[in-house]
Amino acid sequence: MSAFSAHGADPTATDYSYTDCQGSWLPYPAPDAAIETPDSLTPVFINHVGRHGARFPSSPNSTFALRRALERADSLGTITPQGKTLLGLTRYVADRAHNYWGALDSLGMAEQRGIASRMFVSYPELFIDGNVTALSSYSPRCVMSMYSFTHQLDRLNNKVEIITSSGRQNSQLMRPFDLNKDYLDFMRSKVWETPWNDYADTRITAAPLRRVLGKEYPLTLSETRSLAIDEYHFLAGLSAMSVDVDLSKYFTPEEMNAIWSVYNLRQYLQRTASVLSAAPAEIAAPLVLDLIKTTDAAVAGNSDANVRLRFGHAETLLPLFSLLRLDGAYYLTNYYDTVGQHFRNFAIVPMAANLQMILFKSDRGNYYVRFDLNERPIRLMPNDERIYLPWGVARDYMMRCLPLYDQL
């Protein structure tokens, strides 16, 4: 495995913080201030697509794999004092997460309540005798995210009519990665594995493992890669289950950036458009069409809801963001070592990540839309700095982003 002796001069190396390098396990970074809207615009409708909130690890695999290695090091007598601390941490997490793997944590519930509260405060007119519809994937953490969000809205105004839906009937919108044939064929082809493996071999080092397992612990090349990712997966995901850990005790800044970039690249290759395939992004076409259709209905005065909420996964949002070519979510390159400078999972899909389309009506009766990523206004279209776009302009752009067979 490579070391980092040359990374100081590597123009593709990143220098993100330990917090950022938690990647898509980063707890939601709530905005510091409310968004000021021009007085001439009145909010009339919101389309919201969100990820579930912070959760327990989605499976025990990384925790158990790391624990087994540490227990073996302990039995071999190679484990370090730092390794014994980490072993205790793996046992604590395994015990605390027992029967809760993948479940929404109390932090995740609070994240959803916070987003709901800020939406209510920012757009009170939509919740005065208003109607809210919400749907989620069948995943329990998404269902609980939906209920945490809608329960908070009901607490703030129990006159709001709220209709919720969860289950596999929502999978075309919230879990298209389970259904789309082109995407399933892409994943089965494993065309992404060669560039990812090649990149991982240049970035992963055994040094963090040696600090806990000991210099004499027997490690093969393949074990080093898989166990290094398990160690990162385990440690980076702890804050999402409200466990504080000092990551600097286990990784140098260079090592943390390197192992983050390996996981970040895998998400990029599997979940967004790349030179390998557009299929990972195009699975979001039904969701984009639904956003267009429901906004059209609001403009026409035919919507049965003032607010539409949807709760899915990072794997729901990344294709959506990529298909819409949002800043930071769409990057085509043959140079995979540059991906970490342009596609940063922590910036776009932290826990409870969300995209809100807020529809406004002007004093003159025209409709405008603003897109907020994680409750912060963003530009929708490349080379167009406008935050408030005429709905017709935004609609045309969204239609052009769709695969040709879906364009109306």
Image: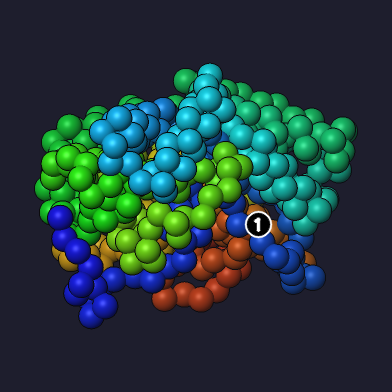
Question: Does residue 130 appear to the left or right of 12 in the view shown?
Answer: right
**Vertical position of residue 365 compared to residue 107: above or below:** below
**Vertical position of residue 398 compared to residue 252: above or below:** above
Residue 283 position in % (x across, y down): 34, 40
**Vertical position of residue 354 compared to residue 254: above or below:** above
Near mark 1 (Cα within 10 A), the count class, few <14, some 14-19 or many ≥20, is some
Residue 54 position in % (x across, y down): 57, 41
Residue 313 position in % (x across, y down): 47, 38
Residue at image point 73% right, 66% down: 33
Residue at image point 76% right, 60% down: 42
Quarter of the picture holding the N terminus: bottom left
Report if residue 398 is visible in the image. no
Residue 66 position in % (x across, y down): 34, 36
Snapshot colouring: rainbow
Residue at image point 42% right, 28% down: 59
Please state which amino acid type lies under the numbered disc 1.
Answer: Ala
**Vertical position of residue 336 compared to residue 239: above or below:** below
Front residue of 187 and 357: 187
- Residue linked to disc 1: 30
Report if residue 130 is visible in the image. yes
Residue at image point 20% right, 72% down: 5
Question: Does residue 386 appear to the left or right of 130 in the view shown?
Answer: left
- Which residue in the rendered view is the most extreme toward the bottom? 9
Front residue of 11 and 290: 11
Secondary structure beneath dot 1 equals loop
Q: How many marks?
A: 1
